[in-house]
Image (spheres, rainbow, N blue to C red):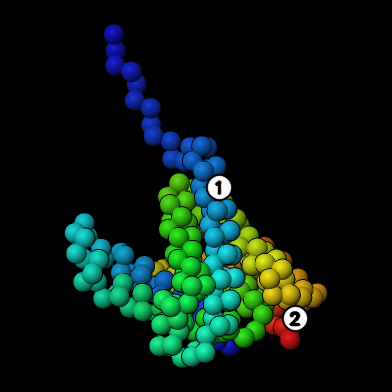
Amino acid sequence: MALVLAASFIGSFGAAFLKSGADRLHRDVRTLFTNWRLAIGVFFFLASSLLYLRGIKEGELTVLYPMVSLGYVWTLLWSRLFFGEPFTREKLIGLAMILVGIVFLALGNR
Amino acid sequence: MSAPPIAPAPVAPKRNRKLSIALVFLCTLLGAAAQILMKTGTRATTDAGPLGLIVAIFTNLNLFIGYSLYGLSTVVLIIALKYGELSILYPVIALTYVWVTALSVGFYGESLNFWKFVGLTTIVLGVGVLGRGMKKQA
């Protein structure tokens, strides 16, 4: 469970780096390969994916897969902090529901 | 005779909205199948270190197909997002959680209990609410 939750955390950094990298892309295709932010984003996704694989090796998918939704919580947090995207009431309610749902899943985990 | 008036391009025609929802639905099925294959594949690995797992992704058929489907579902999702609004598509994406849970019960004999059921329902609804929040921002 800890592995999957850590994977969601690392993966959300992947998304943040991809976004900041994509913001700096130009029409030239070569910029796709010289953009270090994109490279770091892909690296974070890979690392996150390996942690996730390790996590689901043991443990139940009925508990672990929905826990990936914690990634939404991180991603919205980074969007607010790094990209200045505002929190709306719906976003906050959605985030709270996801967090509560993850606690319920943990309670159902054996 | 005057030139025909140029109609403004519609932002999101209805036809495209249906197409995008159908594509996202396909995505959820592909994504769920990927999860089951990845779980089956990772259970068969003996070396679960980072390098061992990377090798396994290319040598273990279940993992390889699982990752391929995962990639494919991501590509389909990106195409769908081009045609539809995130706020409508998010709740559909949350269906993946339902499929994965159903398949885990079917393939691995995992059991649902009260807390898992309540947790899953809360998360699916939460992702749906989150999607509604995306609409306001755009």
The local secondary structure at tag 1 comes to helix
> Would you say the residues marked 2 and 1 are in contact, meaning their CB atoms lie under 8 Å apart?
no
The local secondary structure at tag 2 comes to helix
Q: Amino acid at mark 1?
A: Ala
Q: Is residue A35 left or right of residue B49?
A: left
Which residue bears the numbered disc 1? B22
Q: Amino acid at mark 2?
A: Gly
Q: Quadrant of residue B3?
A: top left
Does residue A78 sit above or below B14 in this rendering?
Answer: below
In the picture, the quarter occupied by the C terminus of chain A is: bottom right
Does residue A37 sit above or below B53 in this rendering?
Answer: above
Q: Is residue A24 visible?
A: yes
Give the residue at x 34% y 25%. Answer: B6
Q: Residues within 10 Å of mark 1 (few under 14, many from 20)?
A: some
Q: Is residue A67 visible?
A: no
Q: Position of residue B7 (x, y in %)?
A: 38, 27
